[in-house]
Each structure stands twice: as structure tokens, then as C-alpha cells.
Amino acid sequence: MIKVAILCKNSLFCESLSLALANDSEVELLNTSLRPVDEIVKSSPDIVMVDSDLFHEVLPRLSGSEAKVLVLGGEKMLGNGFNPFLFDNVIGVLGSTTSVDMLRKALKAAANGEVWINRKDIKGVISSIQNFFRNIERQGISKREKEIIKFVAKGYTNKEIAEALHISEQTVKCHLSRIYKKLGINNRLHLALYYFHSLLPING
């Protein structure tokens, strides 16, 4: 059974989605519409379907949750050069023309840990990722910061980085904090992705 919560601004849209999934024996609807996000998190959904208009409001409050996020109407975000897949919880984007059958397939794919995206939106995802890395390369990463990024990408802990560079662990944390702020990211996975995709000029 896939436990699903739905969050969208338009209550009629939410109700339509709920009705579309009501008779699916593999789906358990937990919450819909305008309930507080905290309540939805407490209900431990497997998947939260989030209206793209609520994305920036809802995603930070789902941080740390095990719930996977399907973005509704996500093609608007991709069209504006914003890539929701850069966020840990996001596992799929559903276009506004998605049929009920495709919605059910997307839910089942997401529940199995698969990424869901319409074929016509793939180009937008790739383009936004390329733009993301081009932009962050302009943020002025120092030589020391590049060294730390390299070690993070190789799986080193803060303690191991400190030992390798002969600095304190607290100094490593301070460097990481500045790096995250410069790049507009907030975790080691995204930092590793940055390293592998941006071709930082560090050998070894």
C-alpha cells in the first residue's frame, strides 16, 4: 500500500486528484489540500504530491522526512530554468496534462524509488542542470575550498579532511559552511555532484 498526501492551493484540484485515486486498491490517501505540512509529515506518507506553486514553501519543511515528493505542474518550473530534482526529496515531476493512468504509474514508480519524468521534460531537466553548474562556477571558490570539495567528493569525513590538510575539524566546518552559502546548496551529496560535474582544476 502506497501512503499518499496531496498538497495544492486549489481545493477543487485537490479533490479531483483524491477522487481519481480513491478507488485504487494500492493507494491510501492520508491528507489532502490545505492541512498544515507538519501534520502531513507526522502522518508518515510515502509520497507527497506538491503543487509547484507551493514547492518553495513546502520543501524546506519536508527536509529530514522520508517522504518522496512528486511535483505537480513541474513543467512550469523547468521552463523557468529551475530544476526541482536538485532537492533530495524530489523523485518526480508531473506535467499539467498527465492522465490518471500515468499518475498511478508515477506513484508506483516513485514508491519503488524510481525517478519519474515525462519524456518531453527531459531536455528541460538537462538544460537546467547545465545552467546550475555554470552559475555556481562563477561564485569564486578559493583554492582551499576546492581542496575541501575534492575530499568531500571522495567520501572523506570532516575529521579525515582536517587530518589530510593539517587544520582543525572546526575550520573544515567553517569552510563547508561558506562553500554551501556560495553555491546555494546544503548537503555533501550536492557538493559531490558539483565536483564531478564542474571539472574543478584539481588533479588527484
Image (tube, helix red, strand yellow):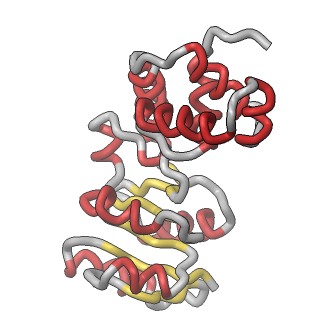
Query: In this picture, is 169 found above or below 29?
Result: above
- Residue at (57%, 19%) from the top-left corner? 198
Residue 201, position in %: x, y?
63, 9
- Residue at (42%, 36%) from the top-left corner? 181
Residue 44, position in %: x, y?
54, 83
Query: In this picture, is 114 found above or below 184?
Result: below
Residue 75 visible in rendering: yes
Residue 131, position in %: x, y?
41, 24
Query: In this picture, is 151 found above or below 9?
Result: above
Q: Quadrant of the N terminus?
A: bottom right
Horizontally, residue 50 falls left or right of residue 28, namely: left
Between 26 and 190, which is closer to the camera in this rendering? 190
Residue 82, position in %: x, y?
35, 39
- Residue at (68%, 66%) from the top-left corner? 112
Q: Quadrant of the C terminus?
A: top right
- Residue at (43%, 29%) from the top-left corner? 132
Query: In this picture, is 172 found above or below 198?
Result: below
Horizontally, residue 114 falls left or right of residue 18, namely: right
Residue 96 visible in rendering: no
Between 200 and 109, which is closer to the camera in this rendering? 200
Q: Quadrant of residue 136?
A: top left
Callout count: 0
